[in-house]
Amino acid sequence: MALIVQKYGGTSVANTERIMSVAERVVSTAKQGNQVVVVVSAMAGETDKLIKFAHEIMEMPDEREMDLLLSSGERVTSALMAIAVQKLGCKSMSFTGRQVGIITDSSHTKAMIEHIEAGRLRLALDEGKIPVVAGFQGIDEFSDVTTLGRGGSDTTAVAIAAALKADLCEIYTDVEGVYTTDPRIVKDARKLEKITYEEMLEMASLGAKVLHGRSVEFAKKYNVPLVVRSSFNDAPGTLVIKEDQYMEKIVVSGVAADKNQVRITIMGVPDNPGIAARIFNQIAGANIVVDMIVQNISSDTKATDMSFTVSRADSKKAFEIAKEVSDKLEAKGVNMNTDVAKVSIVGVGMVSHFGVAAKMFETLAREGINIMMISTSEIKVSCVIDAKYTELAVRVLHDVFNLANS
Amino acid sequence: MALIVQKYGGTSVANTERIMSVAERVVSTAKQGNQVVVVVSAMAGETDKLIKFAHEIMEMPDEREMDLLLSSGERVTSALMAIAVQKLGCKSMSFTGRQVGIITDSSHTKAMIEHIEAGRLRLALDEGKIPVVAGFQGIDEFSDVTTLGRGGSDTTAVAIAAALKADLCEIYTDVEGVYTTDPRIVKDARKLEKITYEEMLEMASLGAKVLHGRSVEFAKKYNVPLVVRSSFNDAPGTLVIKEDQYMEKIVVSGVAADKNQVRITIMGVPDNPGIAARIFNQIAGANIVVDMIVQNISSDTKATDMSFTVSRADSKKAFEIAKEVSDKLEAKGVNMNTDVAKVSIVGVGMVSHFGVAAKMFETLAREGINIMMISTSEIKVSCVIDAKYTELAVRVLHDVFNLANS
């Protein structure tokens, strides 16, 4: 008997018909002799509707209130799913983030899980129940509701799988797995059978929307085997595992694009030690994650331009902070470019192969695509480019690294 | 400085524009030097939408799950309202039923409040904040979410007013107050300036939808002055107060109609002592409130027909129980009539005036309306009639007791 955590995303539970169809899959997994814990997202469109309401009232609504607001969608789905599983004759029970004991810090709208008291969940499993957990949410030490950020239901699922030492965590979505790149952009994109946590981590953080980055980190840390698959059919999906279980040694596994980033530049910053720390401490203090940072030293003026990227959601806040810092430092001002995209190549083989980055830069240059920022890690190379070239860049990179046929 | 609890119903918060308009009223009340606590319902239509989802999945969904499901609507409004009050420059903070410390029993979908730990609410008021409480909900000893039944947000508001010893509890809705009868049925229905708790209690339980019965009971018990008024204009509303503060001595204050009831009859019940207790213990055990009970003794057969009414929501469950009981008692069977309505006249003056009930019966008879069941109290007389005569009955009763001109 295996213990399986199944997480179903918004499109998989978009209406009551879909919820019934998911319940059938859940019950069939249980009837094959497994213990099942279900984690659900909000019904597709619900979270966006709530965000729209809040923004109709106020441009930058309070984050504590946003968390209470947005946590309601997953609660609705968890109750409906528990009812659907009961309808099929199995015992079931919903759990909110609080009831499952997901304790987080107080960083509203992007809280970090501190620990999970899984006792009530274990009890339900021991009683032969199928627990249905509202994803995306927890509570902090003040008993206030927190949310884990967009895609947080993936994190909930993996964290629960880790806490329960589950045998497998299945992430059900509306695509059949992880592809070498976005199949909507490149027609011959190929579904990967396996991918390492590290590669998936880069793919996730780079905008391949199938799996939330933090959930992959969690899975890697606690060695939870993940499967990404479709709730709309029975195709086997993509297995996300440790590198040593991974046989193929492909240089580049995939190409990812992310249009959810905004570039902010503080111009004419006095080039003194400690300046970067001052800027990014302020931004981190507001719980904003900075992705890429590039500093262009200009030797003749003793001043520097400092560019960084943040997610679109954080851009207004980050821009305000950048302006304050710019004033304090007597810099020349701040500008924000929202028409940018980050295009990246990812692969565990990359670290041992020279020239991969150079090949990427050459390929982009050949197409006349200007590179604004570059960032590299052991298993990826990312370039910030003009947003209008995103699809072109993805196609030529997918082609030049021969991903359709690997 | 007065402490005022303001409760806003679903139509008052139906969209973000309405929420902003309510926030303006809240802030203006606060700026007049009052402390304000806001209690909100779900946005109009939301609760019905969620109930529809649940019923698409299952005819009789689990009540614990229904509570989690339905409690989400009020949480959404509380967060949006707190954001709206903040937008107007006041400090504000949302509270769920749990955060406000509303502890209930475990009768899911119709939980009773056991106590309120108002500490966190007082703290927020002391800090100069305007707390916005999600109505209709609490938690039980297992930390499970409970709801207080339809109209439960009224109860939340009055219970909080009682716990905080508020000076006034204002119930904002889409009508201007309590009328002598439903103005949609009788054109010259008149708005009452004042009404006693007792009269309001009867009116509420009889289907005058402006105020939930339990909230009036609470208000009466803790002597919380209530005002029912419209959030769409500045008309003064109806004050609900103690009888000794009530000067006018009108015999009949209002006519109410309730189509939300269903009559169930167990036929041919053996006429032995203790039978009624057996039947209604079973029904009470399922947390179903029985409204009227009528037993017709038939001397020749030593058997009796036992009729009772329950709310439409409870009818399926009550019918199942009645069938079980009928089998056990070897009665002749059970039938259910859903095409019934209860029409009632209400007034504190009634107890000292003879002939009020008789006048009601005569009036109905003159119109050819058959009375199926009768129930009386000190301040009301109710008749169950064929539903199709509801409006006719209300009109002729409003007329015969001269309510338009009292």
Image (tube, coloured by chain):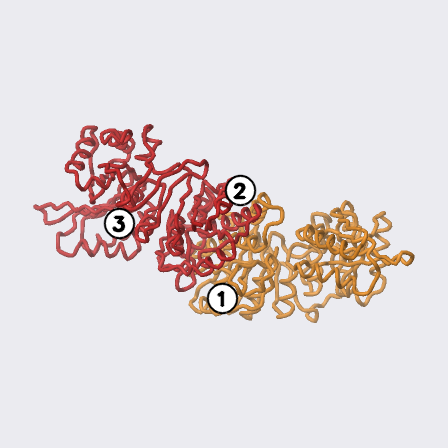
Chain colours: A red, B orange
Same chain for labels 1 and 2? Say yes or no: no
How dense is the environment of label 2, judged by Cα within 10 Å: few (below 14), some, or many (20 and up)?
many
Q: Residue A270 location in percent, x, y?
A: 14, 52
Q: Amino acid at mark 3?
A: Val
Label 3 Cα neighbours within 10 Å, binned few <14 / some 14-19 / many ≥20:
some
Which residue is drawn at the image coordinates 32% and 53% (left, top)? A222
Residues under numbered marks 3 and 1 in contact, where contact means CB atoms less than 8 Å apart: no
Judge the density around disc 1: few (<14), some (14-19), many (≥20) Cα neighbours within 10 Å.
many
Q: Is residue A232 above or below residue A142?
A: above
Quick one: SS at disc 2? helix
* Residue closer to the observer: B371 or A85: A85
Circles 1 and 2: CB atoms closer than 8 Å: no
Type of the residue with mark 1: Gln
Percent across and percent down for residue A72 are 47, 52
Q: Are marks 2 and 3 on the same chain?
A: yes
> Is A16 left, or right, of A229 in this rendering?
right
Kindly identify which residue carries mark 3.
Answer: A290
Q: Chain of mark 1?
A: B
For residue A379, above or below residue B155: above
Residue that label 1 marks:
B35
